[in-house]
Image: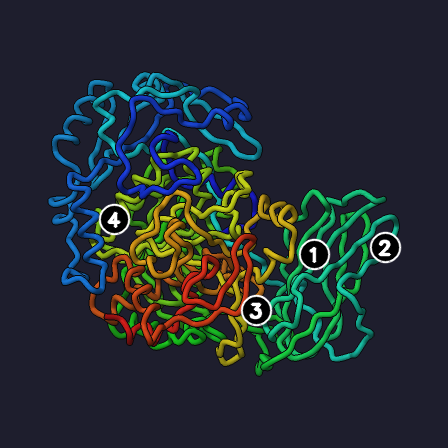
Amino acid sequence: MKSTALATSASIATTGMLSLSLLAPVGGIANAATTASLPATMQIISGSHMASSHLVKELSPSTPWHMGFVLPSKNAQGLSAFVAAVNNPGSPEYHHYLSHAALMSRFGPSRADVGTMQHYLASQHLKTVMTGQVLSVSGSVGQIDATFHTHLAQYRRGSKTFIAPDSAIAIPAPLRIARGITGLYRALPVPKAIPHPFSTKDLITNTTTKHKIPTGTKTTASSGGMTVTAQILSNGSRTPGMAVRYLITATYNGQPDTSASYNSLSGSYQGASSLVNSSATNANGQFLVDFSLSQQQTVSLNLTVSDGVHQVTVPLPAASFVGPSAATTSTLTLFGTPGRVITPWNPSSNPVTRAFNGSTLSSETTVHGPAALAVYTLGNVTTISQSDVAHFAAVFGLPQPKVSVAYSGPNACTAANSACTGAMVPIEEELSLDLQMMETSAPGSNIQIYEAGSLRSALNQVLTQDTAHVFSISYGAGEIPEHQYLATAQQSWDTLAQEANAEGITISVSAGDSGAYEGALESNNSPMLSYPANSPYVSSLGGLETSVSPLGHVNQNAMWGGNIGSELSTPTLLSFLSMQNMIAGGGYSQIEARPAYQQKFVPASDGRGNPDVSFPASVVTPGYFAYFANAPFLFGGTSASAPLFAGFVGDLNLATGHRQGNLNPTLYHLAGGKNSPFLPVSYGNNGAYSVTKGRYNPVTGLGPINLDQLLKELP
């Protein structure tokens, strides 16, 4: 997930409408998959949001417009029952999936519903195409305005620009059949990959000279009116390879210096160092710095902070690294970088496949492959990303993947679209990371790219084409802001996700990178999950900080972000989360009910728990080597976890000879048994929830997976 604030996390790449009556109110829980169809009138954007929004421009009536309707299943109860049975290890129907043709025959939209809607839309001079469960509509803004008795216009609210109707819409009776609407609300999303350029500037010079180490948890230095205070947050010792984190506060003449930022880190230490990760500066002149070291030692490094005019160097409070040594045994020369660095996640040094006993599993693509994978992207950005994954495979000696565009739908961002200005690079970074993570866990796979302005449009195409068996999504939004903008999104998403599960398609989704507060980028500071990771029909992927030895042995797993949720005050934590993605998401849904497979793991009073499983996501501990525009980066975020897991599921499909569908019921079934394949997580707090010693927690879910054991234990 993404650190650069180009829009908001809740500005997800989906489209739809608002009706707070359609789902349970905030604080209540309903199963979105069983909610009714559309009402007679709908308020697209809530009154409070519109009151604080400003009109940017009216849309010309002649502007081309694309939208769509997600139709209901003609047998919704039968679909739910079938999906529950076909993904239940204890059912005789387990893994007896349907072809797309059989799915549509049994559970698709009724011909009468399709005919009724198409006939009415034709009377409004709108063109329609029925594909799978979605009726696509094309026409002009003027025609859309006339059909819904409203007017589409562009608005701005804070940093977010969106298009929406300027009033409540009236839904004609023939169209109320639909389960959801896409395309009457549009906003730029935030992809969730977190990139950090790999350069020698970010590596600490390796020396062994001893120097005086400061005492206490805070240090301060001043120069020319600028004062910098460094506070250590990661209380207690670190295992070598684990991150140590500092809160840095800069002032100038007693006022917050919001222009201050990380400049460099230097000093004396033994062994190898990881990349330094600096984050955005908040209104109080604060930012965070992370680093890790490979060997046992107590060390203080010198941090230099600059605001472009003034500069201060402050010795950091002492950090202690104890436990097994993770010192590197060879020099990294891949990028022409002098010295040694620790734990890069790539196939040539410390592959995640080895650390989680997945080396044998990931070889399935060579023996029985290729795996059939799919990935979502918001934009037409495949040229750079295809080049990046090809370069990645060549550098690390992996079989080249076959990457192709399977669907290019309406409203996808392009360089020519002025509304997407500033968004293209993050979208390109996201897709490049997704493809390279899939190549890491399932080398040489067939990877299909689905480009669209709507997640639901893309998912509908995945299940309609039925050529990809795993679908990875690294986009997300706080479920409550998303519901306030797009109330039909959840229920229509669940319908499509159920159908995908019925075909045996696994959906892997990033759990979020804003801790317990996935709505923080939308100024909603109450704990909540990320949509669509909150759906019970997807596998939600959380994030870890993982310390590994040079041979790929795990020293320790912690939640990505460690105990930052308890080490920072809530206002300070939220100040960072409102600007950037930085820690693993997790919690309980306020919209989706607890699914049956979580009955033994989640309290009855709580909703759907997230995440389901977790994989490493920290840029620092250890960070993934990957390429963007053929330049090396260290990436992180649950954007890495989701495609990595998707690749492993593709491996499982090959190893078992069949699709896995919704893998969650099987995972939770195995977690409750004697030979659980899940590995322990040591600690972590995401602002509202903490890692516990039980089988499940709403921070890291069931935890990371011993993949070799998972394969052995599958029913």
Left or right placement of residue 238 versus residue 315 in this view: left
Give me the residue at 40% from left, 54% from top: 609
Distance (Cα) linking label 3 and label 1: 31 Å
Distance (Cα) linking label 3 and label 4: 45 Å
What amino acid type is highlighted by mark number 4?
Gln
Label whose residue precedes the other's in the sequence (4 or 2): 2
Q: Nearer the viewer, mark 3 or mark 1?
A: 1
Give me the residue at 70% from left, 70% from top: 319
Residue 423, x across and y down, in percent: 50, 42
Check residue 498 in the rendering and tell me which mark sits there, or answer none.
Answer: 4
Q: Which residue is identified by label 3?
A: 335
Please tell me whether mark 4 sits on a helix, a strand or a loop.
helix
Q: Nearer the viewer, mark 3 or mark 2?
A: 2
Please tell me whether mark 1 sits on a helix, a strand or a loop.
strand
Q: Residue furthest right?
A: 224
Please tell me whether mark 2 sits on a helix, a strand or a loop.
strand
Label whose residue precedes the other's in the sequence (4 or 1): 1
Left or right placement of residue 633 versus residue 495 in this view: right
Q: Nearer the viewer, residue 136 or 32?
A: 32
Q: Which residue is identified by label 1?
A: 247
Distance (Cα) linking label 4 and label 1: 44 Å
Name above or below for residue 560 compared with residue 50.
below
Distance (Cα) linking label 3 and label 2: 37 Å
Q: Nearer the viewer, mark 1 or mark 2?
A: 1
Which picture quadrant has residue 132?
top left
What amino acid type is highlighted by mark number 3?
Phe
Residue 207: in sight, yes or no?
Answer: yes
Q: Which residue is identified by label 2?
A: 222
Name above or below for residue 240 compared with residue 422.
below
What amino acid type is highlighted by mark number 2?
Ser
Residue 113, x across and y down, in percent: 16, 31
